[in-house]
Image: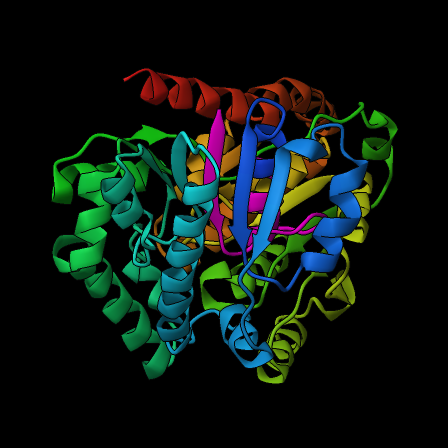
Amino acid sequence: MKILINAYACSPGMGSEPGMAWNWVSNLAKFCELHIITEGEFREKIETVVPTLEQGGNMHFYYNPVSEEIRKMCWNQGDWRFYKYYREWQWKTYLLAKDICQKEHIDILHQLNMIGFREPGYLWKLSRENELPLVWGPVGGLKQFPLAYLQGADLKMNLFNRLKNFLNIWQLKHEKRVDEAFKTAKLIVSSIPDSYRAIKRYKGLESVIIPETGCFLSDDVSLDRFDGHEFHVVWVGKFDFRKQLPLALRAVAIANNPNIILDIYGGGSDKQIAAAKKLADSIGIKEKVVWHGNQPNDVVNNAMRNAQLFFFTSVSEDTSTVVLEAVSNHLPVLCFDTCGMATVIDSNVGRKIPLSNPAQSASDFARILNELERDRGLLKKLSANCRQRQIELSWEEKAKTMVKWYEKLNEK
């Protein structure tokens, strides 16, 4: 089968949306011939890696680049100006896809990423014109920010999240192109249960749930690392409000465990970094926190393979890549029982707490941090169990599932 894929952000050796799209297409290419339209920021990386892959001959890339200014808007999550340019990019991509369909016998169209539902692109239009089946998804961005965790937020952040909650539902119900894409797609893929429920409730449509990110299969990591005196807890992410870094810091303070060391990878604005460090100092854990800053993906993965626990405090995600990377690196996970984490993490590979409020969550996390630090045998068991979860959530398994859906659509 020949599949035309729209993937705005796609790059090998990265996390987040670029890594998500790359892992989808590089695994789908083992079973299909792909014609992939992407933005040009990572062209050099793509063209370096594709020739080294056995399935590289099935990966045909077409580039639709934007300016550096627009790229900066894209990386600055929350910059609403980006959507104007992103919509223009989608229209140019539609024209490029139309040209490809005239030259190639395309069997299926797939709107892959970015996964946010509010920009569905225009492949739905091409689908109608050429009578080609359209797959849309994984579709995300439909979860609601839990308002209890706005406690302590400034007025701007408070209004932003409340407005975003409102707009998510309004756009899902009333935005014309979103509606056209949903009505046209022969298969809708939901990223997480929240997406499934929202699409079912507001559009009356069925979808299949396939988390947008996946695991890598990796060799067992030595369990001896759990026997050391120090208990390294890894936190990874941008210092965005939804990631709730202050919650992680407060939990470590409440745990008051001399063996715990919090290794923080990632960063934010100068203001965000200064605020986080000031908080760590004010609650008395300055000496227990190591600020590693932004590091390459391989450095973070190596840190995971040498740590004892991955601590993920975000309250508003689809399926975060770093959670899957932790499982891929045999690292047990502590997180909230919500969003994509609720699907990925079970009692075999980690521990979850329910959403409540910041004070209660800090106490709940602190209790589990101490329980796991004391029970190294349990941590070894959770780490060993990651192998089976890797298989269940592997990129290749996801690709096989998607190909089965392609085949069903192609038969009709």
Above-or-below relation of 200 to 286: above
Quadrant assignment, res 151: bottom left
x and y percentages locating residue 153 in the rendered image = 39, 75
The quadrant the C terminus occupies is top left
Q: Quadrant of residue 150?
A: bottom left
Q: Residue 348: in sight, yes or no?
A: no
Horizontal and vertical percent position of residue 362: 49, 54
Residue 298 counted in the magenta span: no
Residue 4, given in percent of the width and then of the height, sits at 46, 40
Residue 337: image quadrant is top left
Residue at horizontal 58%, vertical 22%? 31
- The residue that appears at 38% across and 55% down in the rendered structure is 94
Out of 65 and 163, give the one closest to the viewer.
Answer: 65
- Asked if residue 8 lies in the magenta stretch, the reply is yes
Location of residue 286 in the rendering, given as x and y in whole percent from the top left corner: 73, 70
Q: Is residue 138 left or right of residue 303?
A: left
Camera sees residue 192: yes
Point 39% across, 43% down: residue:
339
Name the foreground residue: 44 vs 265.
44
* Residue located 29% across and 58% down the image: 118
Answer above or below: position of 279 versus 246: below
Left or right: 74, with 370 as reference point: left
Q: Nearer the viewer, residue 66 or 273?
A: 66
Nearer-the-camera pick, 115 or 93: 93
The part of the chain drawn in magenta is 1-24
Q: In the drawing, does residue 178 fall left or right of residue 73?
A: left
